[in-house]
Image (spheres, rainbow, N blue to C red):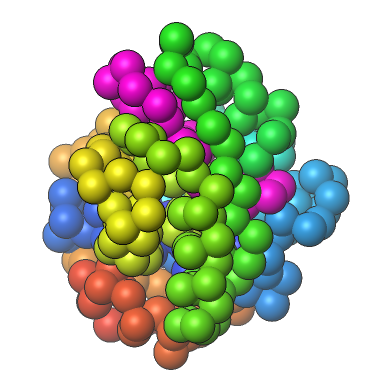
Amino acid sequence: MKIALMDSGIGLLAAAAALRKLRPDVDLVLSSNPASMPWGPHTPEEITELALGCARAAAALGPDALVIACNTASVHALATLRAELEPELPVIGTVPAIKPAAALGGPVAIWATPATTGSAYQRGLIRDFGGTADVTEVACPGLADAVEHGDDDAITAAIADAAARTPAGTSAIVLGCTHYELVEDRIRAAVAATVAPGFTFYGSADAVAAQALRRVADPSRIGTGTTTVLHAGVPTVLPPTAALYAESRALVAPTLAV
């Protein structure tokens, strides 16, 4: 079995690690375009074009499914990617876990990029799945970029800023950017210290990985556990900053595409 994941940068590591945990044999294709990162400041049309480039490069390697491991790309490009690639290649988007968080009944905060925060897409999810919960959208400017570049001081500052704008007493934190899952422990610590000591945390990697495996036509196919990395369609290896995050260590040493 081969699963491809695409993102602007290393945010795809969280879902990739979740897939490897569920299926240690899965062959992974990690397709990104870090030179264009962050995607948030781009127009929706530009984001769609960048996502198409990553998706097409991954699709050329014959995966059984493609995960859009990026909330911003899912907001702007999911419909276009599905129109081009399905039904031959199942495409799985990344959606913030608003529904299970809201089901707890308490106040919910969604941490997301400025591009996703306030978008019609996210507002629609809140309307459809937020129920009666009090949902606050918290934009986290600079956090994804800081995670991508392993900038420890910038990560600390961005998390502290977002935590300061998260309402006291929040009972659930939903991460609306895949990059944020790589620093989940630091977000947990900051929120516990400044907002509420007891809260439930929701990422998307586990649910997305499970959905990708459900969409594979033949789940009995056995892979060899390889990891192939593409940057703008060019075979490469994971950037050095990836090693800063535990998720990268769940992956075998990457091999070059042929």
Residue 60 shown left or right of residue 141 in the figure: left
Q: Nearer the viewer, residue 183 or 35?
A: 183
- Region of the chain picked out in magenta, as a range: 93-116
Where is 79 relative to 201, above or below? Answer: above
Residue, x 65% and y 60% (percent of image)? 141
Where is 239 relative to 54, above or below? Answer: below
Percent across and percent down for residue 130 are: 47, 17
Residue 100 image-quadrant placement: top left
Residue 142 image-quadrant placement: bottom right
Percent across and percent down for residue 18 are: 25, 53
Residue, x 48% and y 64% (percent of image)? 160
For the question of whether residue 100 can be seen, the reply is yes
Residue 142 shown left or right of residue 107 in the figure: right
Percent across and percent down for residue 22 are: 16, 49
| Residue 109 shown in magenta | yes
Percent across and percent down for residue 229 are: 46, 74
Q: Nearer the viewer, residue 199 or 194?
A: 194
Residue, x 21% and y 70% (percent of image)? 250
Residue farthest toward the bottom in the current orientation of the protein? 240
Residue 247 image-quadrant placement: bottom left
For the question of whether residue 77 can be seen, the reply is no
- Counting labels gives 0
Q: Nearer the viewer, residue 113 or 21?
A: 113
Residue 162 shown left or right of residue 39 in the figure: left
Where is 7 relative to 85, above or below? Answer: below
Residue, x 40% and y 72% (percent of image)? 228
| Residue 123 shown in magenta | no
Q: Nearer the viewer, residue 174 or 161?
A: 161
